Amino acid sequence: MNNLNISKRLGFVVFLALVRYGGVMAQTIPVFNFSFDELREERKVVDMVRGETYVPKEVFAFTKESVSGLENEIHGKYYKLVDGVVGNAVLLDGYTAYLELGDDALEKNPYDDEGDDTRLIKESFTVESWIALGAYPKNTVPIFSHRRAVESGETEGYSLEIDSWGRVALFIGTQTEKTESVFSENTLPLNTWVHVAGTYSKEDGLSVYVNGKLVDNKKISGKFNYVTSDVETSFLIAKSRTAMRPTGTIRPNGTAETKIFFDGILDELKVSNGAKPSKQIADYYKKYKTNKKPDLPVRKMPSGPQSPGVFRAVNTTLSYYPGWDAPWAVGDNADIVVQFDESDCKFVFWRGTSYIPSWVTENGIAFNNGFNEGWNDHGSCEPMSDKKTKYSSVKIVESNKARVVVQWRYALVDVLGTFAFEDPETGWGDWTNETYTIYPDMTAVRNDKLLSNAPNAAHEWQESMIVMSPGEKPEDLLDLAALTVSNAKGDEKTFSWEFTTPPLFPKEPVNINSQIVNTKSKYKPFSSIRPQDNPVMDVYAGEQRRHISVFPWWNHWPVAPRPTDGRFASFSDRAAHSSISHWYTWDAYKKTDRSMTKIMLCGLTSKNITEVATLSKSWSNPAEISVDGATEAVYKAEEKAYHMSASNGNMVDITLSGSKDSPIYNPAFVIKNWGENEPEISFNGTVLPKSKDLRYDFKHSLNGIDLIVWLRTESTSKTTIAIKNK
């Protein structure tokens, strides 16, 4: 190198990197500087021939690193340029988006004409960035890492990371074959701009800073062991180097190891050779600190817009937030929303819950009754484990003015896609068809048909679950007195979680067959099993950590795409769920050698448990029916409806013998082969106009046109309904 080049180099480095603070000379040479002010996208048509099997890619994104002047690719399904603390910043989806820099990242160095390892950190260093977290990582994830994987058997390199408790952590490898680390004590806030930094020097050891303040320091005896330039170790941003299970994993056999990603925004990510002094870090924070809210999307479990005042089922595609939506290979009409016309409550079949249907209250609290569940060596086989709904689908069977029918079909698979009780000869395992017949009063019958090689084998059929959006805990949605139950006689009791968890199998009242889950809403979810089906209810009494929540609390479902069937929630940073009870067992409604069907009444109500018990009686012990002008009059509990066939010139006279033990409660009638003639309907001799209290419509089938009638009435005495052509 000639003298002129030496002078240039020394002058430039001294001008940019020597800063005097309180008599201390701090030499810091920039190594990486990502401002994320610009993002360039490029599209290429894949030149791929038949038979090639690599994963094609056609959209590429790049951001420039200013020290080298090189562009670096941003990988993943979703990333976005957003407003930052200084200029722009990059939003990363937390599932797929990251940067990975290879050895070429060190090749171009404006401070070194001969290309030596000036940018390869060998001694002291500083890593710093502005970050805004959308959610805490499921395990430790680097903001920036040039550290070899521990699994390699080597302790080399450094990384500044965020752990699953939202703490800042600095890791280095030492020449004594140890990994040294230091963590901030407090959890970082979500949805807030925070400046984080980590420094290391031989004299001061490891230091971590949050918003300009030194929050922890650790002096070590071992010397920093840097990654040598001849070892292939990439520079990673926002992605873990190795796959790992989430912290809080409950069942390791049911949880795969996967890469961890940073969920949030990065801005002004800088790496320097040399440890910046505390005052320099504090002054930088003071200069740029901001109270503006980061441009992070709202994360709210979707249920569709406010009801337009129409009772119906609608095909739609519900959006959660862009980063979560992006990987889904779906188009229009992926989901179903059932809307009601007398409240803004809904019944939602959404792919983010694996189509496990949720009753959504007027103020947005989501509740479901679970699904069928089996087990294998990997854990639970259930739709909750079907993260991409590969084996789960929904369709609208009926949607008319009198009722809605939706069928949900799903497989009982584990997180790896393996079936419960799979027949090795045929490859068929357990499947379920659940058919919901839903009425305008927000009541429904769940007709749950298990298709199995062994339908009598152990299965779970129901679980009372609350589903939470980010920012919500179970206590935000549930009263501490969370469960009210009754039996057919009207004996009732309310159970509270305030001081202790209720007993697993409550001793009273005996023969419980109805329950209301006491959500903090006007309309509350209820369910009921027919007494003749011998139901047994239990309280969900497992996997509780009362110091965190008095209710069980997990976030491995919903919307969690990675293969896991159990993870404790410690923060309300992610969508989550909690369980209150099970209908532990009840008798089959129908059974064959290859199937078992069970039925359950469910819905939303603003009334008390006594009213639910009355409704349940009308369903489980319906008023006796007699008809004139029709044949084959029967009550089908799986639809909560009386069925008959028109036989006398479209005139049907119906008598229901209501009583205290067989009350009449909003009955429904299906009259087969009625045709499309408009009916005139009389109730106890009075002609009723079509209204919200009297609804009817027509159902077309291969065999004819049926008339469906729903009538709002309650009675414990004889009631007549006359239906004739207008």
Image (tube, grey):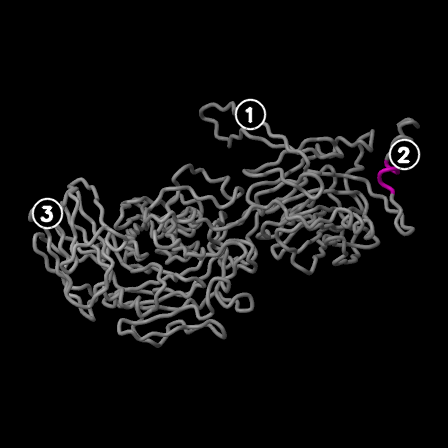
Q: What residue type is disc 3 on?
A: Asn
Please count the marks in the image. Answer: 3
Q: Which range is magenta?
A: 13-18
Question: Which SS class for mark 1?
Answer: loop
Which callout, 2 or 3, points at the residue further toward the start of the chain? 2
Mark 2 vs mark 3, foreground winner is 3
Q: How would you classify the magenta stretch by its main secondary structure? A: helix
Say whether residue 235 is left or right of residue 495.
right
Residue drawn where x is 67% and y is 60% of the image: 186
- Position above or below: 481 against 151: below
What number is the disc on residue 584? Answer: none
What number is the disc on residue 11? Answer: 2
Q: What residue type is disc 2 on?
A: Gly
Expressed as whole percent of the image width and height from the top left, the position of residue 432 reads 31, 51
| CA distance for labels 3 and 1 | 66 Å
Expressed as whole percent of the image width and height from the top left, the position of residue 93 reads 57, 43
Q: Which residue is mark 3?
A: 650
Crowding near pointer 1: few (<14 within 10 Å), some, many (20+)? Answer: few
Expressed as whole percent of the image width and height from the top left, the position of residue 25 reads 89, 47
Which part of the image, by quadrant, shows the N terminus? top right
| CA distance for labels 2 and 3 | 101 Å
Mark 3 vs mark 1, foreground winner is 3
| CA distance for labels 1 and 2 | 43 Å
Expressed as whole percent of the image width and height from the top left, the position of residue 271 reads 75, 42
Tell which of 407 and 85 is nearer to you. Answer: 85
Look at the image and tell me whether residue 141 can be seen. Answer: yes
Crowding near pointer 2: few (<14 within 10 Å), some, many (20+)? Answer: few
Question: Which SS class for mark 2?
Answer: helix
Q: Which residue is mark 1?
A: 44
